[in-house]
Image (cartoon, coloured by chain):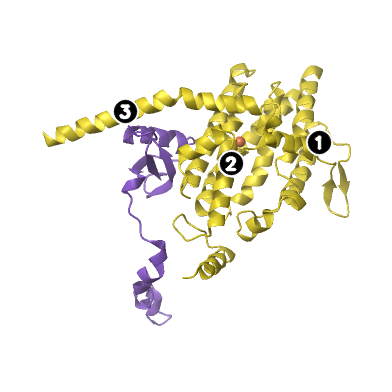
Amino acid sequence: MSNTWPLWEVFIRSKQGIHHKHVGSLHAPDEEVAIENARDVYTRRQEGVSIWVVESKNITASNPEDSDAFYEPAKDKIYRHPTFYDLPDELKHI
Amino acid sequence: MKEADLEQKFQDKIDAEIRIEPRDWMPEKYRKTLIRQISQHAHSEIVGMLPEGNWISRAPSLKRKVGLIAKVQDEAGHGLYLYSAAETLGIDRDTMFQQLNSGKAKYSSIFNYPTITWADIGAIGWLVDGAAIMNQVPLCRCSYGPYARAMVRVCKEESFHQRQGFEILMTLMNGSQEQKDMAQNAIDRWWWPSMMMFGPTDDDSPNTVQSMKWKIKRYTNDELRQKFVDVCVDQAKVLGITLPDPDLKWNEERGHYDFGKINWDEFWNVVKGNGPCNKQRLKTRNEAYDNGKWVREAAMAYSEKRAARKAAGKVA
Ligand SMILES: [Fe+2]
Ligand SMILES: [Fe+2]
């Protein structure tokens, strides 16, 4: 039997219409207790209407060391932005 | 990349106010400094529950009791946010508990003083939480992302603590002579230890320069202490309470209050473990840890059994 409770990442939706956002982590023996603990640790002042917990070991993350090369392809594509297109000033609603 | 180049790139990021995140490259000393600082901070929140928890069962009214419970519960939360921030640097929770329980790790010395009367709860809220806020507000801009984010949460919650403390003292100061004396006596005992919460003088804190360069710290100990004094003098006037320092006076030239000499011998003595409650605090933490062991184990055993049952059900 493992000695310490596993680590969980906690995501909270602060109100309807807003994404869940990572708020921190906590230890709990299982997902049910993780949700209850998340409520006590992260929503003591009604900071949330919905909680997600994910065991930390199940998260796959991009590597920050590769980030220059990894995000490079989007760097020179200024034509993906509306300001790339030259239009006359008198043109409205576009 | 060579170590020196990495270090230069790291410092450039810090100088540009770009936050450092857990998996980014960082100098080993930056990591170690943060692990020490964040875990000590977490320990302080946890041990900080003890002097105040002492008065929960004896709070003078239901209103005071729910307020105090909520505050103590917040401090538990602060400890948990901070432990989880420290864990992002590669130290695990149990190691930190061991460091605290064995006496190897330090926590804020202020919590090694006893809470003798109800007025102490007011004094702690006003002065101790007040000093903590002074320390913590600049930490919201600390260069290490998870620590800074935890501090934003903490600071939002702290302001109620300080207001609650002030209100407790104000109520006593509007009461009978005996109540006024009790409030004054609490301030007499808590003022100097609160001043010590900012740590040794700048001349005596060799690590400050590096921490400022890394933007872990934004102000020096003496700068924060001075801010605290300036704020408290005016607040004490509102309370009608006397801060126990005959040398406290406005210095026109500096634009700050001058204050008397801090008893650093006392400070170091408490840090070394000889304060009035050091042994008691550690004993309580150790008992909580040891007595909670079977609960932690039972919860884990239950969830493992449930997971196994679920897996078996799927196969069948
Ligand atoms: Fe706190
Ligand atoms: Fe507090």
The x, y position of residue B79, in whole percent, is 53, 37
Q: Is residue A46 visible?
A: no
Amino acid of disc 3: Ala
Would you call the spot at circle 3 few (<14 residues within 10 Å), some (14-19), or many (20 or more)? Answer: some
> Which subunit holds the residue at mark 2?
B
Locate residue B315: give its quadrant.
top left
Would you call the spot at circle 1 few (<14 residues within 10 Å), some (14-19), or many (20 or more)? Answer: few
| Residue displayed at 55% across by 42% down | B39
Spatial CA span between label 1 and label 2: 33 Å
Marks 1 & 2 on one chain: yes
Marks 1 & 3 on one chain: yes
Amino acid of disc 2: Gln
Would you call the spot at circle 2 few (<14 residues within 10 Å), some (14-19), or many (20 or more)? Answer: many
The x, y position of residue A67, in whole percent, is 40, 66
Q: Which chain is yellow?
A: B
The residue pinned by badge 3 equals: B301
Point out which mark residue B237 bears: 1
> Which subunit holds the residue at mark 3?
B
The residue pinned by badge 2 equals: B40
- Dot 2: what SS? helix
Marks 2 & 3 on one chain: yes
| Residue displayed at 53% across by 27% down | B286
Q: Is residue B193 visible?
A: yes
Q: Which chain is purple?
A: A
Task: Compare residues A48 and A69 and report the one nearer the observer.
Answer: A69
> Which subunit holds the residue at mark 1?
B
| Residue displayed at 88% across by 52% down | B252
Spatial CA span between label 2 and label 3: 31 Å
